[in-house]
Image (cartoon, grey):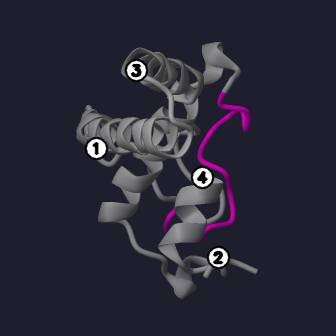
Amino acid sequence: MLKKGSKLNSILTGTCPRCQEERMYVDRNPYNLPKLFKMHEHCSHCGLQYQLEPSFFYGAMYVNYGLTVALGVAVFIITKIFMGMDITESFLSIILALIILMPVNLRLSRNIYINMFVSFDKEAVKE
């Protein structure tokens, strides 16, 4: 499932979607906020330019919106139904979870978005 060549591997590890050899981000830690969006210009292994066109990652905002809604619904279900919190505590939990997971969510949305357009290519992997 997380084998090299799967989109899920590239999405979760933040590696190049074409060769999955190099990480796309300069800093691996998403909580290093000054370097949250800093990416390499291109992959040093296969040469894929990550910014496929000007303002390419603006489309990732839509993916981010979907992930944020899904996370909010999941936190609400967990806190309200399984933990029995009242509505105010549930909404405070949603806000807290969204703030804490914001950097991870932003990177994950970029990873998903670029993987929608670029597929793994065995020929791109240089040994």
Mark 1: amino acid:
Gly
Label 3 with label 2: CB-CB less than 8 Å: no
Give the distance between the C-alpha atoms of the residues marked 3 and 1, in whole angstroms.
18 Å
Mark earlier in primary sequence (1, 4): 4
Q: Nearer the viewer, residue 2 or 46?
A: 2
Mark earlier in primary sequence (3, 1): 1
Mark 2: amino acid:
Leu
Mark 3: amino acid:
Phe
Mark 4: amino acid:
Gly
Mark 2 sits on what residue?
2
Residue shown at the point (34%, 52%) measured from the top left: 113
**With 39 as the anchor, is 114 left or right in this view?**
left
Residue 88, position in %: x, y? Answer: 40, 15
Mark 4 sits on what residue?
14
Q: Give the SS element for disc 2.
A: loop
Label 4 with label 3: CB-CB less than 8 Å: no
Residue shown at the point (58%, 25%) measured from the top left: 36
Give the distance between the C-alpha atoms of the residues marked 1 and 4, in whole angstroms.
19 Å
What is the number of the mark on residue 66? 1
Residue 46, position in %: x, y? Answer: 57, 66
Where does the N terminus fall, quadrant-wise?
A: bottom right
**Image quadrant in which you'd find residue 125:** bottom right
Mark earlier in primary sequence (1, 2): 2
Mark earlier in primary sequence (2, 4): 2
Task: Characterize the local packing of mark 3: few (<14), some (14-19) or many (20 or more) Cα atoms within 10 angstroms.
Answer: some
Give the distance between the C-alpha atoms of the residues marked 2 and 4, in whole angstroms.
12 Å
**With 84 as the anchor, is 69 left or right in this view?**
left
Figure check: 61 above or below 9:
above
What is the number of the mark on residue 91? 3
| In this rendering, the label closer to the viewer, 2 or 4 | 2
* Magenta residues, start to end: 14-30
Mark earlier in primary sequence (4, 3): 4
